[in-house]
Image: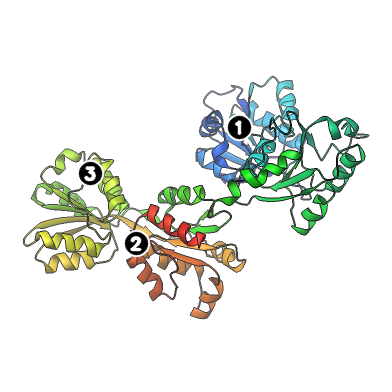
């Protein structure tokens, strides 16, 4: 295969690092990615992704799985979609796997669903075996069982059927005729699950009815099973084709035929989650978004991570280094964010110090989440204010008296001065020591703006004032009228009053704000609003 074609297909990462032993043949791992939900990949599949040097992935494999891949690995998109020109033909994909393995690389071929169930995995392995290349096949959750399960349909049930058949609705077009025995299939299996059958759905239903299946047999069609984009429609053999057309259901979709479809009314669970299908933009830094994303996705939301902040080193470590040298002179150590905890200890360890050097210091934190971050370093906060804000922390300290107290405040290089001002006014000697710096990430203004222009977002979450200001800069609205147009119908969520005030001062309307300023409470408030 031509090198320029392979290079052009790299979605991210870089050309794979050289194999460890020159001339050594690599190995190909054919890994089932599951039906779409990245949580459904096997532990073995995740393990191999983490160690791959080359990953060749499909259109139906969740892109979120690529976060497990090393930054030094080569990523090659080999997706194939119905009605769209393929990135690579099947023979080209097989040759690519052979060539990469012959070059000595560990290659993961990541395929949607299960690679040996209508995934053409057998064809790829035949080519690999023909060249005497070592290989391994890792099964995946097949789309058929996932579509039924996530639509609330048990494909077998003792009171309905004990048999199921998997068939393809898109046979090899080069074959002289169909090898599906419709006369036997129509009444021979209690449940029939059909892959890739949307285009031929009228033909499929006619064949089933023609060969004896009751026209009133229930049918479900499930699109993008197990993902936040899942959509399901239900009808009968005689009505489902029109229902699919009217609902604009397109591939990738699975068709489930059988009386078990009637159980969907009782068992449907996935699409009934409180935030199902809501598209939520997460503006937090990428390394901090995981808790918010996981909680929202558990409730059915479709999260789009669009970081408006990147964390980098401060312009200088002079102040914090001097403070660490003189750490014994301080009375209080204060943390106002998770990042402050993380980067303070990173610098502490860099100076060959550890938690024992903080003996005698009292430690105050802005809230419960920051206290939890502190506990990961085996330290307990002496002070947590009732109000999780800088103002709340200042008030709690002033109640205890700070006259002549020496206070160390590691924080962002640029931050609100309210805590410093109030403690200084109370007689404290405050040392502000930058341990990190917030900057805007590489400009993605056009990508962000297009999401709002195309009305792809239902909700935006803000967890700090800087996420608000950076978001608005990246959105690029020139005036209030344009801002209102872009955010029309979009719910704005702020974690607390400081963030909310920053949003309001910049022309945003706050729709949701939790009483307690934590990520879990923020998600609870979003769910409560959704239920209303």
Q: How far separated are the C-alphas under marks 1 and 3?
A: 40 Å
The residue singled out by tag 1 in the image is: 108
Question: How would you rate the neighbour count of disc 2 (Cα within 10 Å): few for under 14, some for 14-19, many for 20 or more?
Answer: some
Question: Which one is nearer the viewer's eye here, 1 or 482?
Answer: 482
Q: Which residue is mark 2?
A: 515
Dot 1 or dot 3, earlier in sequence: 1
What is the secondary structure assignment of the residue under circle 2? loop
Label 3 crowd bin: few (<14), some (14–19), many (20+), radius 10 Å: some
Element marked by disc 3? helix
The image quadrant of residue 247 is bottom right
Exactly how many numbered labels are in the figure?
A: 3
Residue 14 seen: no
Front residue of 271 and 322: 271
Q: Nearer the viewer, residue 19 or 446?
A: 446
Q: Is residue 413 left or right of residue 483?
A: left
Residue at the image position 44 percent from the left and 73 percent from the top: 508
Q: Where is residue 344 drawn, in percent x and y?
A: 25, 48
Residue 121 rendering spot, x and y as whole percentages: 71, 30
Residue, x 13% and y 47% (percent of image)? 361
Foreground: disc 1 or disc 2: 2
Neighbourhood count class around disc 1 (C-alpha, 10 Å): few under 14, some 14–19, many 20 upward: many
Closer to the N terminus: mark 3 or mark 2? Answer: 3
Front residue (pair 241, 388): 241
Residue with the mark numbered 3 = 348
Quarter of the N terminus within the rendering = top right
**How far apart are labels 3 and 2 at the CA level?**
34 Å
Q: Residue 140 appears at what percent x and percent y? A: 63, 32
| Dot 1: element | strand
């Amino acid at each position: 295969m031509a090198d320029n074609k392979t290079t052009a297909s790299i979605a991210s990462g870089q050309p794979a690092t050289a194999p460890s032993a020159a001339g050594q043949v690599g190995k190909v791992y054919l890994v089932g990615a599951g039906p779409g939900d990245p949580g459904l990949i096997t532990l073995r599949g995740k393990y191999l992704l983490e160690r791959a040097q080359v990953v060749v992935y499909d259109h139906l494999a969740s892109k979120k799985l690529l976060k497990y891949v090393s930054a030094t690995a080569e990523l090659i998109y080999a997706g194939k979609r119905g009605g769209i020109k393929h990135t690579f033909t099947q023979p080209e994909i097989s040759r690519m796997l052979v060539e990469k393995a012959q070059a000595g690389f560990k290659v993961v071929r990541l395929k949607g669903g299960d690679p040996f169930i209508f995934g053409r995995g057998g064809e790829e392995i035949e080519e690999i075996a023909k060249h005497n290349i070592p290989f391994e096949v890792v099964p995946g959750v097949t789309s058929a069982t996932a579509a039924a399960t996530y639509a609330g349909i048990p494909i077998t049930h003792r009171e309905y059927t004990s048999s199921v058949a998997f068939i393809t609705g898109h046979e090899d077009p080069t074959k002289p005729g169909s090898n599906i025995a419709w006369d036997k299939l129509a009444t021979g299996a209690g449940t029939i699950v059909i892959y890739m059958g949307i285009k031929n759905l009228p033909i499929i239903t006619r064949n089933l009815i023609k060969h004896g299946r009751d026209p009133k047999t229930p049918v479900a069609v499930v699109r993008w099973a197990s993902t936040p984009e899942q959509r399901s429609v239900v009808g009968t053999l005689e009505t489902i084709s029109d229902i699919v057309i009217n609902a604009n259901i397109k591939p990738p979709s699975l068709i489930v035929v059988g009386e078990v479809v009637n159980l969907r009314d009782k068992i449907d669970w996935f699409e009934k989650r409180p935030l199902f299908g809501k598209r939520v933009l997460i503006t937090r830094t990428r390394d901090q978004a995981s808790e918010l994303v996981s909680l929202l996705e558990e409730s059915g939301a479709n999260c789009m991570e669009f970081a408006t902040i990147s964390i980098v080193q401060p312009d200088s470590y002079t102040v914090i280094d001097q403070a660490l040298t003189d750490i014994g002179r301080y009375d209080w150590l204060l943390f106002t964010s998770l990042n402050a905890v993380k980067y303070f200890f990173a610098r502490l360890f860099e100076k060959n110090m550890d938690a024992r050097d903080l003996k005698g210091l009292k430690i105050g934190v802005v809230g419960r989440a920051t206290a939890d971050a502190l506990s990961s370093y085996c330290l307990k906060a002496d002070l947590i204010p009732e109000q999780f804000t800088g103002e709340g922390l200042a008030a709690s300290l002033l109640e205890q008296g700070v006259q002549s107290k020496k206070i160390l405040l590691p924080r962002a290089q640029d931050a609100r001065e309210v805590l410093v001002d109030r403690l200084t006014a109370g007689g404290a000697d405050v040392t502000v020591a930058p341990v990190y710096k917030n900057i805007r990430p590489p400009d993605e203004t056009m990508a962000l703006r297009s999401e709002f222009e195309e009305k792809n977002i239902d909700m935006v979450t803000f967890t700090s004032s800087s996420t608000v200001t950076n978001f608005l800069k990246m959105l690029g609205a020139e005036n209030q009228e344009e801002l209102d147009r872009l955010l029309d119908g979009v719910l704005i969520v702020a974690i607390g009053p400081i963030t909310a005030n920053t949003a309001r001062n910049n022309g945003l309307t706050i729709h949701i704000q939790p009483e307690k300023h934590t990520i879990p409470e923020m998600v609870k408030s979003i769910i409560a609003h959704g239920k209303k």
